[in-house]
Amino acid sequence: MTLFDSPSFSNHEGVHAFYDEKTGLKAIAAVHSTARGPAVGGTRMWNYATAAEALEDVLRLSRGMSYKNAVADLEMGGGKSVIIGDSRTQKTPELFQAFGRAINSLGGIYYAAEDVGVSVEDIAEARKETEFVVGLSGGKEGSGDPSPVTAEGVFRSTLTVARRLWKQDDLTGLTVAVQGIGHVGGYLADKLHKAGARLVMTDVNTALLEEVAARNNAEIVAPDAIYDVKADIYAPCALGATLNPETLDRLSARAIVGAANNQLATPEIGRILFERGVLYAPDYVVNGGGIINVASEMAARNSGGAYDPAWVEGKLARLMETLEEVLERSNSEKRPTHEVADAIAEARIQAAADEKARARAA
């Protein structure tokens, strides 16, 4: 299958491959849409088994960023990048500087930030070679690690779902199965515990897992056992596609609210969940807090101002209103939540594209 034949290609504007022999950099940057502004999305470093697997991942993630940025009502398009390699053993400052040079060659159509396997410090190394990175901690515009804001958005989404399903304003008496407690999951677990939830969690990083579980009085299970937990809410916060034909029948939760990107292996999974009466809070709506945080940094940089927490809070509150709209329309239109969210995102992207076309024609 060629790039253009892939179902995940989805009319990407550009897909760029980079290689640096000296540092061993192997990276792909995908730009899905710039209709609403420059494409912005995180950089994932992962030990992909094949380049084809990396390409498929970056294409899906890139399209997801277009939709995420649109539903968050940000003046940004969608893109994503991946670095092929083991983030635990193959990271070097030189590798991320080479990555910065690669991103710089795109001339500003794509801005990179942190994602799985990539830290604020890594992005700071890339910043030495390009201005087209965000999620920095230094300077008056620096927004720092976006993970806490992502976790806050997922937490508020969980409360929104709890009010809808259980008619309660906290999580007392509810069990949440948390899959992955890395960048976002750990922050989320703290918030869920404080709100009264009983937590069952898993992660491949056993040391970190034990640390987070201890402070939240959580039960630990093996990675594959998380699907069998008798939980009210399943919170996928690791890699995507954990909602698939192999796991679907094992889940007992009434709701799915998590931070992971691309949780549905296929759109059909979302329809099956809907037909079974499981409330799926669309991932790119729920986890939009981090990109909102990054957007404030970009706005400050462009205006010469400073990072504005109040602006972030306003956008986060608006995002929760959008989630309410998605859930309400799903109920009234008898449509799966992911289809409703897609329709909202696509309408906003198309409106921006149409406006650009009119401006070119004028």
Image (cartoon, rainbow, N blue to C red):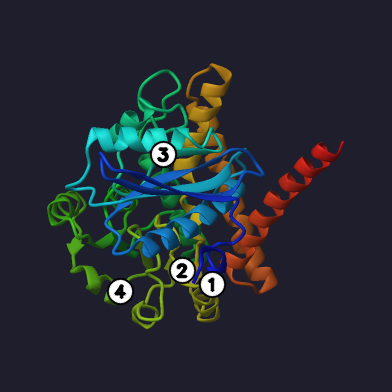
Point out residue 303 in the picture as x, y percentages from the top left corner. 58, 19
Residue 321, compared with residue 37, is above or below; it is below
- Image coords of residue 122 (percent x, y): 30, 35
Mark 3 residue element: strand
Q: CB atoms at circles 3 and 1 under 8 Å apart?
A: no
Q: Earlier in the sequence, mark 3 or mark 1?
A: 3
Q: Which residue is mark 3?
A: 113
Q: Which residue was labeled with disc 1? A: 267
Residue placed under numbered mark 2 in the picture: 264
- With respect to residue 264, does 313 lie above or below? above
Mark 4 or mark 2, which has the lower sequence index? 4
Front label number (1 vs 4): 1
Q: Is residue 308 left or right of residue 148?
A: right
Crowdedness near tag 2: few (<14), some (14–19) or many (≥20) residues, C-alpha within 10 Å:
many
Please tell me whether mark 4 or mark 3 is closer to you in this view. Answer: 3
Nearer to the camera, 53 or 310: 53
Seen at 43% across and 51% down, the residue is 154
Q: Which residue is mark 4?
A: 227
Q: Cα distance, mark 1 to mark 2?
A: 6 Å
Q: Amino acid at mark 2?
A: Leu
- Which element is circle 1 on? helix
User: Which numbered disc flags the more N-terminal residue, 4 or 3?
Assistant: 3
Alpha carbon distance from label 3 to label 1 = 27 Å
Q: Earlier in the sequence, mark 1 or mark 4?
A: 4
